[in-house]
Each structure stands twice: as C-alpha cells, then as structure tokens.
Image (tube, rainbow, N blue to C red):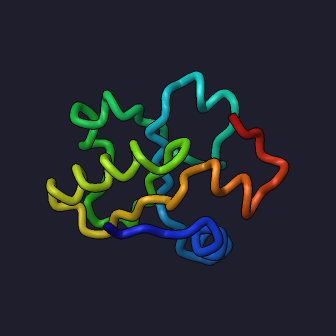
Amino acid sequence: MNEITPQELKARLAGAERPLLLDVRQEWETRLCRLDNSVHIPIEEIELRTEELNQEDEIVIYCHQGVRSAAVAEYLRSLGFGNVKNLAGGLDSWARTVDPTMRRY
C-alpha cells in the first residue's frame, strides 16, 4: 500500500508540483471540513467517474480515517493509475497532527 503521512503531504502541498487531492467522502462530510483545492468524487461514484482523473497525475486520496480512500487507491491502481497514494489516517490524522484548527468529527 502506497501511503503518505499528513506531514509528508503538507510538505508536498508547499512545493511547486502539488499532487491532485481526491476526496472520496460523502457530501455532508465535505461540508464539515476539507483540504483546499480537492476534487470531490464520493466513493460510490468512483467507478463511473474515473475518466475525470488523469492516470499520469500524482493523486493523493483521502477520506475521514483512511479506510475508504485505501480501497479507492487500490481500485485506481488496478486500472493502471501509477502514482496513487492514500493519506494515512485520513483527515482525522491531518487535523490531529498538521491543522488543529480543522473541524474533527
């Protein structure tokens, strides 16, 4: 499993070549909190919407705690997406270790 820690993602987002952020949570969750400039494709829609993603992009997938996003990362890898990472611990870990001002749920 290819994972990226919240601290590693923070560093990547500060750089010149930022990864594409893919939020696979439900709509109500995105209203509570989210990472800026994320693409939102709920997990149940991913099979129908993969054409919206570029297989060549570096993609970091996240959800609340990293379980749904890990499943989506595996699915995208099976389709030939070569540079896909799961945010370890999801947004909950991000809020605890990188951005304590982010709303937790």
Query: Is 29 on the left-hand or right-hand side of 48?
Result: right
Residue at image coords 15%, 56%: 78
On the image, the x and y values in percent for residue 53 come to: 32, 49
Given the current orientation, which residue lies at the most extreme top position?
Answer: 28
Question: Is 19 on the left or on the right of 2, as rendered?
Answer: right
Q: Quadrant of the C terminus?
A: top right
**In terms of depth relative to the viewer, which is nearer, 60 or 51?**
60
Residue at the image position 34 percent from the left and 63 percent from the top: 84
Query: Given the current orientation, which residue lies at the most extreme left position?
Result: 79
- The N terminus: image quadrant: bottom left
Count of numbered circles in the view:
0
Q: Residue at x 41, y 47 (%)?
A: 67
Q: Is residue 101 left or right of residue 36?
A: right
Q: Is residue 47 above or below residue 31?
A: below
Q: Position of residue 28 (x, y in %)?
A: 59, 22
51 sits left or right of 6 in the view: left
In the image, what residue occupies the spot 31% across and 47% down?
72
Residue 59 place in picture, x, y as percent: 40, 60
Residue 73: horizontal and vertical position, in percent?
31, 54
